[in-house]
Image (cartoon, rainbow, N blue to C red):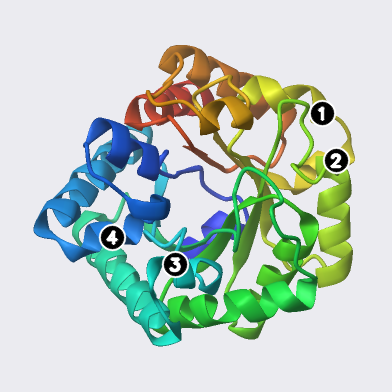
Amino acid sequence: MSDVEMLLKGEKPWIADAGLETVMIFLEGIDLPHFASFALLDSREGQAALTRYFDHFAKIARDGATGLILDTATWRANMGWAAAMGLDGADIRKVNLAAVAFARACRDRLATATLPVLVNGVVGPGGDGYRVDRALSADAAEALHSPQIGALAEGGVDLVSAVTMTYAAEAIGIARAAQRNGLPHVLSFTLETDGCLPSGQSLQAAIAEVDLATSQSAAFYMVNCAHPTHFRDVLVGPWTARLGGIRANASRQSHAELDVMTELDDGDPEEFGALYGELAHLLPNLRLIGGCCGSDHRHVGAASRHVHGH
């Protein structure tokens, strides 16, 4: 069985990284215009920071006998954000290819016979990840995201993950673009403090809508960019079998509160880990855990200890 099949079929536990952008800005002191982490690839300092960052998670994976999902630094590298950063389609292709090349080099350095590493092409929203600032149709979302997903496929990622999705139609468009490029894909939704998407739709309804529109093409779904206490109470019913990953925020604050904060709220890493242990009991097919805003290797390490029992 290949490493990708082990992830898709849930044959092995995996960890992912944490809040890359918040770690770089608040802990490493590196400015990321528009939260665009691909800017790190432009300097030796940035590349060194990325290397240190992923080395932490490789150690956690080795200690926990899990696999490692190694993200590309491409959350903002799509055509929805290109104009704001002075980029065109050719630049977006170049940025994504460079990010995949860096991730593949990290994979080649870190992977061993007992530590499988998958390169995950990260696709972020064409707009804001906290709110629905402009809602696209599924067709428009597919067109918007196709250049990036095509470049990620060209670069040689193992799968793509759409993260911080705020409404269902964008996730549908990304899934269709991934299908056209022959890429396994995972879809992850941002949730508010009430456990619903920023669009107001319930998580259960969003998953059902996307599954219906895409013939259940996603390998599984994830929740990200919300504290575990914001959504644990909605994880009830057979539909939760489609949830295979959690990448939560460290902070209990709402998105509106986080948006105006000038200091990092990294919460309590040990409590974060214990809450993941509770979530693992609610989600029968949980196979991937990581973090989102405000979290770092301490949070993911605690989560891995509580979920994987090491």
Q: Residue at x 62, y 76 (%)?
A: 144
Judged from the image, the secondary structure of the residue bearing numbered disc 1 is: helix
Q: Is residue 273 above or below residue 31?
A: above
Distance from Cα at disc 3 to Cα at disc 1: 32 Å
Residue denoted by label 3:
77
Q: Given the image, on which type of amino acid does mark 4 rest? A: Ala
Q: Residue at x 66, y 70 (%)?
A: 174
Residue denoted by label 2:
202
Judged from the image, the secondary structure of the residue bearing numbered disc 3 is: loop
Ranked by sequence position, the earlier of labels 2 and 4 is 4
Instruction: State which mark lies toward you, 2 or 3.
Output: 3
Distance from Cα at disc 4 to Cα at disc 3: 10 Å
Residue denoted by label 4:
39
Q: Is residue 56 left or right of residue 292?
A: left
Quick one: quadrant of the C terminus? top left
Identify which residue, 86 or 35, lies in the foreground.
Answer: 86
**Residue 98 place in picture, x, y as percent:** 29, 73
**Residue 287 place in picture, x, y as percent:** 58, 43
Instruction: State which mark lies toward you, 3 or 1.
Output: 3
Ranked by sequence position, the earlier of labels 4 and 3 is 4
Instruction: State which mark lies toward you, 2 or 4.
Output: 4
Q: Given the image, on which type of amino acid does mark 1 rest? A: Val
Q: Given the image, on which type of amino acid does mark 2 rest? A: Ser
Q: Is residue 240 above or below residue 164?
A: above
Residue denoted by label 1:
234
Circle 1/circle 2 CB separation < 8 Å: yes
**Residue 122 place in picture, x, y as percent:** 48, 61
Ranked by sequence position, the earlier of labels 1 and 2 is 2
